[in-house]
Amino acid sequence: MQFAAVLYEGCTLVNTTPHAINVLDYRTHEVRFSIPAAPQPLRLEERLEHVGNLAGVPLVRKSLVANISLPEPQEGVFYVVPLAVAQMLQRPDFVVPDDLVRDDQGRVIGCRRFATVI
């Protein structure tokens, strides 16, 4: 896997997602810095198991499996990951974009903070 990284104020932020991450100023919404999209984003493997039918429609049990090879946590290095990855693996160095800002058409243009999911 290949990821994109940026060094900002002494921290290395590694983007593992397929989207560029724009970090916005809390008040002005101006871009403070951006992290390019990962050329080969991190993905969870989806597993399906047929469990029956519901009103004549197939019913499956869906689970996500983390087949992910990342280095051990390092001082000052944080990985921007999809929420499902953060929830599944709960590493203190995994962060997700939070407090999203959207344009007038509802598209996400950036985040004003990061969150950990532990």
Image (spheres, grey):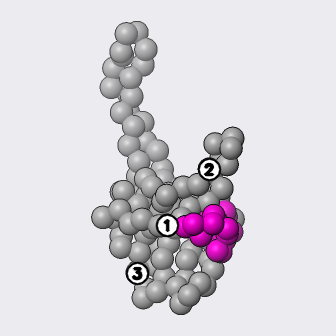
Front label number (1 vs 3): 1
What residue sits 33% from the left and 25% below the top?
Answer: 51
**Residue 76 position within the rendered picture, expressed as x and y whole percent measured from the top left:** 46, 86
Q: Quadrant of the N terminus?
A: bottom right
Residue 74 vs 5, above or below: the answer is: below
Residue 50 vs 108, above or below: the answer is: above
Q: Where is residue 90, by image quadrant?
A: bottom left
The numbered mark, 3 or 2, whose residue comes first in the sequence reads 3
Q: What residue would you read off at disc 2?
A: 102
Q: Secondary structure at mark 3?
A: loop
> Do we see residue 4 in this rendering?
no
The numbered mark, 1 or 2, whose residue comes first in the sequence reads 2
> Do we see residue 61 in this rendering?
yes
Q: Which residues are magenta?
A: 20-38
User: Disc 2 residue type?
Assistant: Arg
Tell me the distance, in whole angstroms, between the alpha carbons under discs 3 and 2: 32 Å
Q: Residue furthest top?
A: 56
Q: Is residue 35 magenta?
A: yes
Q: Is residue 84 magenta?
A: no
User: Disc 3 residue type?
Assistant: Pro
Q: What residue would you read off at disc 1?
A: 113
**Residue 115 position within the rendered picture, expressed as x and y whole percent measured from the top left:** 42, 65
Tell me the distance, in whole angstroms, between the alpha carbons under discs 1 and 3: 21 Å
Q: Where is residue 32, by image quadrant?
A: bottom right
What residue sits 43% from the left and 85% below the top?
Answer: 74
Q: Secondary structure at mark 1?
A: strand
Residue 39 vs 102, above or below: the answer is: below
Residue 98 vs 104, above or below: the answer is: below
Q: What residue would you read off at disc 3?
A: 73
Disc 3 to disc 2: CB gap under 8 Å: no
**Residue 96 position within the rendered picture, expressed as x and y whole percent measured from the top left:** 47, 62
